[in-house]
Image (tube, helix red, strand yellow):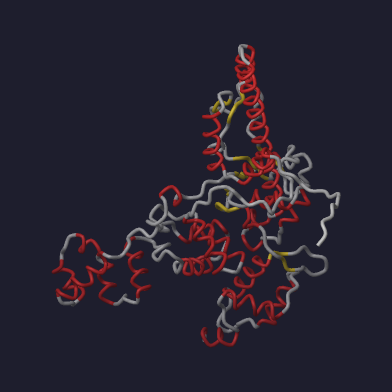
Amino acid sequence: MQQTLDFRQAQSVIMTPQMQQAVKLLQMSNQELAGYLEEELAQNPLLEKAESTGDGDASAGDTKPEPDMDFSATNQFSNVGAGGGHSFDIDDRTIEDTLAAHRSLRAHLQEQLATELPDMGDRLVGSLLIDRLDEQGYLREDVATLAASLNVPLPRVTSVLARLRRFDPVGIFASDLADCLRLQLIDQGRYDDIFAVILDHLPLVGNRDYAALQKLTQATRPVLEDRIAILKHLNPKPVSDFEHFIVQTAIPDVLMKPLPREIGGGWRVELNAATLPKVLFNQVYAADILSKSKTTQDRSYIQTQIQSAGWLVRALDQRAQTILKVASAIIAAQDGFFLYGIAFLKPLILRDIATEIDMHESTVSRVTTGKYIGTPRGLFELKFFFSGGISGTDGAPQLAAGAVKARVKTMIDAEKPGDILSDDEIVAQLRTEGIEIARRTVAKYRDMLGIPASSVRRRQKD
């Protein structure tokens, strides 16, 4: 055993406390940021809460107008603000996320969505349905209307909904109370004709009109009372195990709106002013109290608060510009989806966006996780616009795997009894549309979508 002294020179990235805080700010949603800023306002007397008037108070220091961006689908985003600077663009993926982890209904359902629905398009549909749940966990909106908003065939939305109705907690995605109780009885293996009649006449249970129920069910009084006792032990609100504020519909952090055709069309992307918290650094007040400070300790305290307030305002502006830059690039890349529906979803990975806007992939990952965008087609988490792709023929652009699966399902849904498509025929038809795909891939997509082979479909439709 021998001890030696060895000197080595190496490079490493050191995250200062302010840099780590900047990363956390970027990860936060607008709602999480609001809570954080309330704490900062309580600690720093030089910070003020800005009113949402759209105009900055010149006497309060440096504030910038509400960030937004107009662009067409062909923009290269070379001039979308100063986002992506060194405050955020650091590869620190080994640093653990120290933000508080809240167990939300949405996260619980999204985890199941990622596991149970391997198709990207189905997950997009499922995500839209998740964000349409009410406070009780019911889906009361018309499914046909939701299908039209996505430009997706109604049978596909119905199919996705049927799978979501098997998610935990049992009873989620029910259309009403009777439907919620029915799902729980089915899960327990207790649902039968007597329960079916009782659930169709729930007001009679509330009125304790057992005579009418006996007449309708043809069941004896003891049997009827036993069934009603079982109903009373079911959960009428499947989301009761989750906190109230978490079950609310997701609130968009970013908004996109179509621009008028007379000015060239395209989209306007902006941060959601209704949820984006704003703070001001009151430089006039800071200078005043600094000049009146009599002790070294007082001056040191005020100078520290000045530096902290100035940094926070700059970090918030950097966060806003970065989110806008990433969201704008995603919108441009998926312009076909927003214009024509899910079948036009393109393949997209984090590296594509990172390269386009000259940021690190980890920065794009932070921006797209847990942040929602309100679009003409509904509300989506930004990360759902990323998927793998299928090569086109003769240099045609790639299509997202989810879009190709959607096209395969649309073709099969349109089949007539005397004209059932084989996998080879589907391949040939896709090739005429510029989509190069192998027959075994079509077969795999059919299996993932729960669609039987052509021979089985032919017998079913005869």
| In the image: residue 286, left or right of residue 148 | right
| In the image: residue 283, left or right of residue 53 | right
Q: Is residue 69 visible?
A: no
Image location of residue 263, percent across then percent down:
70, 39
| In the image: residue 416, left or right of residue 94 | left
- Taking depth in this image into account, of 247 and 150 the one nearest to the observer is 247
- Taking depth in this image into account, of 143 and 285 the one nearest to the observer is 285
Image location of residue 382, percent across then percent down:
62, 52
Question: Which quadrant, please, contains the N terminus?
Answer: bottom right
Image location of residue 26, percent across then percent down:
64, 44
Q: Is residue 209 visible?
A: yes
* Residue furthest out toward the front: 1
What residue is at 53 percent from the left and 51 percent from the top?
A: 101
Circle count? 0
Image location of residue 444, percent across then percent down:
64, 78
What residue is at 35 percent from the left and 64 percent from the top?
A: 180
- Is 59 placed above or below 442 here? above
- Is 78 placed above or below 296 here? below
- Is 400 placed above or below 36 here? below
- Taking depth in this image into account, of 343 and 401 the one nearest to the observer is 401
Corner quadrant of residue 185 = bottom left
Corner quadrant of residue 127 = bottom right
| In the image: residue 21, left or right of residue 39 | right
- Is 69 placed above or below 289 here? below
